[in-house]
């Protein structure tokens, strides 16, 4: 297969591009997404949530290429035989690119690692990890205008389907490339909204960004993994499925008359962070896990 | 042909000559979920593979 822009051999089919022209496509798509959804400007103080995996390192790399000046924030959940490798890749990348990085760990913040939390059999791994990670990211990014995450087209199309299937109307309507601006929460954005996992890994390979290919040991237990397999099957048979889901989701969201959220944000009585309830979800989870762990 | 499947860290060795997509089908892999490296170069699914090629299959799935 030839590149659609020149006579060189293509290295990817979607879109059919050679190395040089795929790099161009990648950076153009990223810039278009940032502009279309007004995610941030070069004047904004920008931080990227990094794990050391392909999405976050590709995001830092490509944002730098486009002339942005991102810093990084890393949350170590404490997953043995998985996180160690990505921390190595992350440290190398940070060093090579002279970036600023803030490191936070579940162990220091919560007194338990995710592995330890799992032994208490209280919650699903993704529930603990997701809630506590979101909590810590918000807590430690207050001096920034925007927090960018490496969520890609695959993640987002899966999320739409999951929320539909589980009748999570509130969560479904809250999706998209940019979170609603709220006083007590750092503005969250997803610049890779229109780039797929395959395109992102291709970008890391052709730009010699070292990433670990490991999969989170808890991922296989999630409903998301099932939806991912289903979507990839569909995409293979009907190319464009993922993009269609997101495009149509955004159109529907625009058409639906949504009342402004009437949930009042208050301060958690235990930690003082923003919360919908008297005690925030993160503190509820921490309390339950620690009581089981220490019993 | 020597094939290394990164996700499962499996190494396979069998005779194969044909298109990359045929190899993926034979291995029951979805081309959406993998990147194929032939002799250290990324190739597309229509690439012709020979038995003496060195093949590495990377999984694009990560995280959780």
Image (spheres, rainbow, N blue to C red):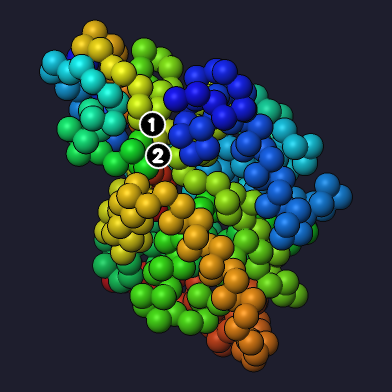
User: Of tags 1 and 2, which is closer to the observer?
Assistant: 1
- Please indicate, yes or no, whether residue A214 appears anywhere in the rendered image: no
In the image, residue A17 sits, relative to residue A151, either above or below, namely above
**Could you tell whether A245 is left or right of A182 in the image?**
left
Percent x, y of residue B30: 29, 41
**Could you tell whether A74 is left or right of A97 in the image?**
left
Does the CB distance between marks 1 and 2 fall below 8 Å? yes
Where residue A22 is drawn, which disc sits there? none
Q: Quadrant of the N terminus of chain B?
A: top left
* Residue nearest the observer in this picture, A4 or A233: A4
Q: Give me the residue at 48% from left, 63% from top.
A: A245
Q: Residues within 10 Å of mark 1 (few under 14, many from 20)?
A: many
Percent x, y of residue A165: 36, 75
Residue at numbered disc 1: B35
**Could you tell whether B2 is left or right of A285 in the image?**
left
For this orientation, the residue located farthest to the left is B14
Say which element carries label 1. strand
Q: Give me the residue at 64% from left, 87% from top.
A: A257
Residue at numbered disc 2: B60
Q: Earlier in the sequence, mark 1 or mark 2?
A: 1
Total numbered badges shown on the rendered structure:
2
For this orientation, the residue located farthest to the top is B52
In the image, residue A115 sits, relative to residue A25, either above or below, namely below
Q: Give me the residue at 41% from left, 68% from top.
A: A161
Letter of the chain that mark 2 sits on in the rendering: B
Q: Give me the residue at 38% from left, 31% from top.
A: B35
In the image, residue A103 sits, relative to residue A190, either above or below, namely above
Q: CA distance from mark 1 to mark 2?
A: 7 Å
Percent x, y of residue A235: 38, 51
């Amino acid at each position: 297969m030839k590149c659609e822009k020149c006579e060189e051999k293509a290295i990817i089919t979607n879109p059919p591009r050679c190395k040089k022209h795929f790099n161009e496509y990648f950076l153009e798509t990223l810039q278009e997404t940032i502009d279309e959804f007004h995610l941030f400007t070069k004047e904004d103080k920008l931080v990227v949530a990094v794990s050391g995996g392909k999405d976050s390192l590709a995001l830092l790399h490509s944002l730098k290429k486009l002339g942005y000046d991102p810093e990084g924030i890393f949350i170590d959940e404490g997953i043995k035989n998985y996180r160690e490798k990505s921390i190595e890749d992350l440290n190398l990348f940070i060093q090579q690119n002279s970036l600023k990085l803030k490191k936070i760990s579940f162990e220091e913040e919560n007194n338990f690692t995710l592995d330890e939390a799992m032994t208490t059999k209280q919650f699903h791994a993704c529930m603990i990890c997701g809630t506590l990670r979101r909590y810590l990211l918000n807590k430690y990014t207050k001096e920034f205008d925007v927090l960018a995450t490496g969520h890609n087209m695959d993640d987002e199309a899966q999320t739409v389907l999951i929320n539909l299937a589980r009748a999570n109307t509130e969560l479904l309507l809250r999706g998209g490339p940019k979170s609603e601006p709220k006083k007590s929460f750092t503005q969250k954005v997803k610049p890779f909204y229109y780039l797929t996992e395959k395109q992102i890994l291709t970008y890391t390979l052709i730009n010699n960004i070292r990433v670990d290919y490991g999969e989170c040991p808890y991922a296989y237990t999630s409903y998301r993994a099932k939806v991912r397999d289903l979507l990839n099957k569909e995409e293979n048979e009907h190319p464009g499925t993922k993009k269609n889901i997101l495009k149509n989701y955004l159109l529907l969201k625009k058409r639906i008359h949504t009342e402004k959220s009437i949930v009042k944000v208050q301060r958690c009585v235990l930690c003082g962070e923003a919360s919908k309830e008297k005690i925030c979800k993160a503190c509820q989870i921490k309390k339950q896990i620690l009581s089981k762990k220490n019993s | 042909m020597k094939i290394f499947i990164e996700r499962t860290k499996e190494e396979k060795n069998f005779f194969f000559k044909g298109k990359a997509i045929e190899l993926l089908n034979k291995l029951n892999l979805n081309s959406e979920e993998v990147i194929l490296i032939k002799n250290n170069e990324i190739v597309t699914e229509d690439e012709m593979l020979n038995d003496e090629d060195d093949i590495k299959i990377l999984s694009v799935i990560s995280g959780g």
